[in-house]
């Protein structure tokens, strides 16, 4: 049985990086939030990091700048065509410390003693995000972080724009059910220290969990 998420991203993989820029038409500076996500990890040279839903590798350069050649970045994605684009980016930049894994997030086995886990706009595609967050917590070192930047349903005045948001993101399999997901609550459930902030009229959030 085909996976609608995989099929959607296969279709748009070749043009994904350009498509992401179109979020500006809706007033969202997605690059700003990606940067905030990576900065929230508080990475150091030599760190070992897992990105869930790495896609074409848009976040790789930001992470690698912080962890250096001593560190290691593991990019996990379910879609083969997106990983093909990520692999192309890795090869073009000569990054030898990036490993790419094609896997459903919920089936992925985290390495132990990780220095950080993060996801930007991808974790809530899995209905089993609670399991994923718990397993991520178990894999992290003490004082290390799990960071999620994702989309949600606004509860403020901007909620009237929800149909527009859903229409715009429909090609990427984002629907009302995706916006109803609450992965940040799993961060708050398992992590001893957490922060949460909203952006883009309440349609976007950044959740940070620190293992204590």
Image (tube, grey):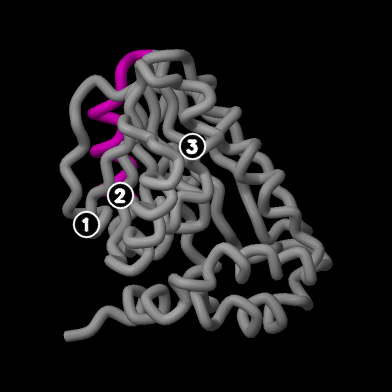
x, y percent for residue 18: 62, 67
Q: Disc 3 vs disc 1: which is toward the camera?
A: 1
Sequence-wise, the earlier of marks 2 and 1 is: 2
Say which mark, if any, is on residue 76.
2
- Asked if the residue at tag 1 contacts the one at tag 2, i.e. Cβ–Cβ closer than 8 Å, the answer is yes
Occupied quadrant, residue 46: top left
Above or below 103: residue 192: above
Disc 3 designates what residue? 147
Disc 1 designates what residue? 103
Q: Is there any visible trace of residue 174 in the rendered image?
A: yes
Q: CA distance from mark 3 to mark 1?
A: 19 Å
> What secondary structure is found at the residue carrying circle 2?
strand
| Residue 29 left/right relative to 178 | right
Sequence-wise, the earlier of marks 3 and 2 is: 2
The residue that appears at 23% across and 56% down in the rendered structure is: 102
Sequence-wise, the earlier of marks 3 and 1 is: 1
| Residue 75 left/right relative to 148 | left
Q: Disc 3 vs disc 2: which is toward the camera?
A: 2
Q: Which residues are magenta?
A: 130-142
The residue that appears at 38% across and 64% down in the rendered structure is: 82
Quadrant of the frame with the C terminus: top left
| Residue 199 left/right relative to 189 | right
Above or below 156: residue 47: above
Q: State whether the magenta stretch is mostly helix, strand or loop.
A: helix
Question: Closer to the camera, 19 or 51?
Answer: 19
> What secondary structure is found at the residue carrying circle 1?
loop
- Asked if the residue at tag 1 contacts the one at tag 3, i.e. Cβ–Cβ closer than 8 Å, the answer is no
The residue that appears at 78% across and 77% down in the rendered structure is: 160
Q: CA distance from mark 2 to mark 1?
A: 6 Å
Question: Closer to the camera, 55 or 18?
Answer: 18
Check disc 2: other Cα within 10 Å, few if <14, some if 14-19, many if 20+: many
């Amino acid at each position: 049985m085909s996976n609608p998420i995989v099929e959607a991203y296969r279709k748009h993989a070749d043009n994904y990086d350009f498509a992401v820029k179109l979020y500006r038409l809706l007033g969202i500076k997605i690059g700003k939030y990606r940067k905030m996500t990576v900065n929230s990890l508080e990475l150091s040279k030599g760190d070992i990091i897992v990105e869930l839903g790495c896609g074409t590798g848009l976040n790789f350069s930001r992470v690698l700048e912080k962890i250096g050649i001593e560190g290691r970045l593991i990019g996990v994605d379910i879609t083969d065509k997106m990983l093909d684009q990520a692999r192309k980016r890795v090869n073009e930049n000569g990054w030898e410390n990036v490993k790419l894994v094609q896997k459903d997030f919920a089936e992925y086995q985290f390495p132990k003693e990780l220095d950080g886990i993060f996801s930007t706009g991808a974790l809530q595609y899995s209905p089993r995000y609670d399991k994923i967050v718990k397993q991520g917590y178990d894999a992290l070192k003490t004082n290390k972080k799990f960071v999620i930047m994702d989309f949600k349903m606004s509860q403020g005045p901007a909620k009237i724009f929800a149909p527009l948001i859903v229409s715009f993101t429909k090609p990427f399999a984002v629907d009302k059910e995706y916006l109803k997901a609450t992965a940040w609550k799993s961060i708050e459930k398992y992590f001893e220290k957490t922060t949460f902030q909203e952006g883009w009229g309440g349609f976007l959030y950044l959740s940070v969990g620190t293992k204590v």
